Image: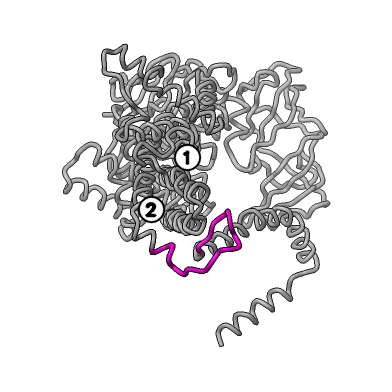
Amino acid sequence: MTAIDAQGTVAAARARRTPRQKRDARVAYAFLAPFLFLLLLFQYVPLAMMAKNAFMDYSLLNPDAAKFVGLLNFSDMLYFDDARESLAATFLFALGVVAIVIPLGFVLALFLDSKLPARGIVRTIIMLPVVTSAVVVATMWNFLLDPSNGLINGVVTAMGLPRQPFLTSPDQALVMIAVMTAWQQVGFAAILFLGGLQGVPKELAEAARIDGATARQVLWNITIPLLSRTTLFVVVIMTVFSLQAFAPAFLMTDGGPQDSTNLIVYHIYKTAFVMQNAGYASALSVLLLVIVLGISLLQMWLLRARWNY
Amino acid sequence: MAQVSLAGIGKTYEGAGANTIAGLDLDVQDGEFLVLVGPSGCGKSTTLRMIAGLEEPTAGEIRIGGRRVDGLEPRERGIAMVFQNYALYPHMTVAQNMSFGLRLAKLPRAEIRRRVEGAAETLGLSGHLDRHPKALSGGQRQRVAMGRAIVREPEVFLFDEPLSNLDAQLRGQMRAEIRRIHDRLSATTIYVTHDQVEAMTLADRVVVLKDGRIEQQGSPQELYDRPATRFVAGFLGSPQMNFLAATVRNGALDLGGGAVLPLPSGRPLPEGRRLDAGIRPEAFAAAAPEDAAFHATATMVEHLGATSLVHFSHAGQDCAALMEPARAPRAGQPVHLSADPARLSLFDADSGRAV
């Protein structure tokens, strides 16, 4: 009954639209159409195919032999350790990236927000890694981290410390690719923080100073709380980005040593194209999609406007 | 004891000639309500911010209660400030906003409570202490901003155009409230505004600033009745004073267009001297055509209720006169006015200074 009422109201609203509104709507859809078409073709169609394949036993070498296996791929995820281990490495990686990027990005943003003369140059310098191809960055860091000839080990030994294995050690490899990714992303985080900082009215800091706050107390009591929304946004962006990281594992470590850097997207790639188990890879992809979606929804829920300024 | 004194205060912004303050001297007595007024860009807000410690003067010294404070942090100056856009902390409740400074000063909890509740009571905010600023109206936010200043029990209150974001009715209410609070706390108050009504109604003493200099200072009535310059005369008073080009001729004042007024008594002026004559709209009076000095046609009549503002043109100059509604003409009708020579303000045509 209510549904019918609601439909009636919608129909009435639609009938009340003026010819001009209808024309505007048609023009709007015409402008949107090319993009929507491409989005559908390259995003949603593959997504739907992937969702279907997640329930199939399926190989790219012989797609015609695909057969429906129900939830087998998903129960395999629980039965075998690979998904759990890969996800654990991926979350650890994401945690590392976020833990480095947030404080560093914030401090950089504070620097960029001040009136220092070198601001423009620093802004360019920290944005440069962000716009550089991940392949270039990974290759460069491969050189830097090379255990025998790398620049970083050169510095380490020059300081009288023992030479480090870096990417060849199961204990250090994940940390190193997290550091590298953080280095690449910190500029982006800083720009987002800077936007947040510049959105905080200057009077609030002034009022706090008059209220007796020192610079540190202003930062702690006013600036940081007011940037909580920005911070949450940066955390989510960085987490989602890290969950989708592929280049470091692919180009620097091949997921090793001992699967210590076997990030989930790299694992999916290997499962589909090396192991020729596209069905299982699709199921893993669905799982990743659900995780990322969950994080995004959580963010949207947490970002409901509580207060504004 | 909190006298505020500025001695030779200067402020120069890098690469900017305008908005500069040069050699400002000002003494504010303990418990005085001083209003700094002037058009935008005259340096009034900058002066206030220098007293607050939010900006540093490039010359001169500032003393509060005899103690030199320029170079000190705002928190070390014993001041509280109310901002134009309230500057309330959006993530704190009303109570937290008001108590922020006290908590930083590590006052005992009971004392904080006492002061916050006292201020809330005074300002009619008692029922709103747990709300966030977002949930308050403009007037309530303004009260919280004032409460935040009051609880700190400062020696000097600074107000930076605190009422300009409020609607007219609320502005009137808050104006009265600010004056009432001042009278109760009798703290030294420095209040910046561009609204001459606020200046007139609130101040013990008004300081009119122009281009970073003091144009004139004195009690509101003094400034209104005896403006030292044409600028002050035009700035204070609403509706504005009328200015007419005048020449001294045959011992009288020729205002052009056939209007001649006797010179104000006791002020002999040389023959042929060019002046600007200032006549307040209320200094005009309706007169019989044969007694009137001004004969014109009303171009527009604004009915203000108790009075009517009659606009007319005299010798090419737009003028306005306040008249009783019953005696006001309609637009297009002739209007005959006299003006009281005793209420005339005369300014040198070149320097703009009162003669």
Picture quadrant where residue B316 is located: top right
User: Foreground: B164 or A275?
Assistant: A275
Q: Is residue B298 left or right of residue A267?
A: right
Q: Secondary structure at mark 1?
A: helix
Residues rendered magenta in the picture:
A57-75
Q: Secondary structure at mark 2?
A: helix
Instruction: Give coordinates of residue B59: x percent, y percent.
Output: 44, 14
Specify the amino acid type for callout 2: Ala
Q: Chain of mark 2?
A: A
* Rendered residue at 48%/34% (across/down): A251
Q: Residue furthest bottom?
A: A1
User: Foreground: B255 or A191?
Assistant: A191
Tell which circle, 1 or 2, labels the residue nearer the N-terminal end: 2
Residue B282 visible, this orientation:
yes
Q: Label 2: which residue?
A: A83
Q: Is residue A291 left or right of residue B212?
A: left
Seen in the picture, residue A209 relative to B72 is either above or below; the reply is below
Q: Label 1: which residue?
A: A196
Instruction: Give coordinates of residue B339: x percent, y percent.
Output: 69, 39
Q: How is the image coloured?
A: one colour
Residue neighbourhood size for the residue with mark 2, other residues' Cα within 10 Å, grouped as few (<14), some (14–19), many (≥20): many
**Residue B225 forms part of the magenta stretch:** no
Residue neighbourhood size for the residue with mark 1, other residues' Cα within 10 Å, grouped as few (<14), some (14–19), many (≥20): some
Question: Looking at the rendering, in which quadrant would you find the N terminus of chain A?
Answer: bottom right
Seen in the picture, residue B185 relative to A25 is either above or below; the reply is above
* Rendered residue at 54%/39% (across/down): B196
Instruction: Give coordinates of residue B185: x percent, y percent.
Output: 29, 42
**Residue A66 forms part of the magenta stretch:** yes
Specify the amino acid type for callout 1: Gly
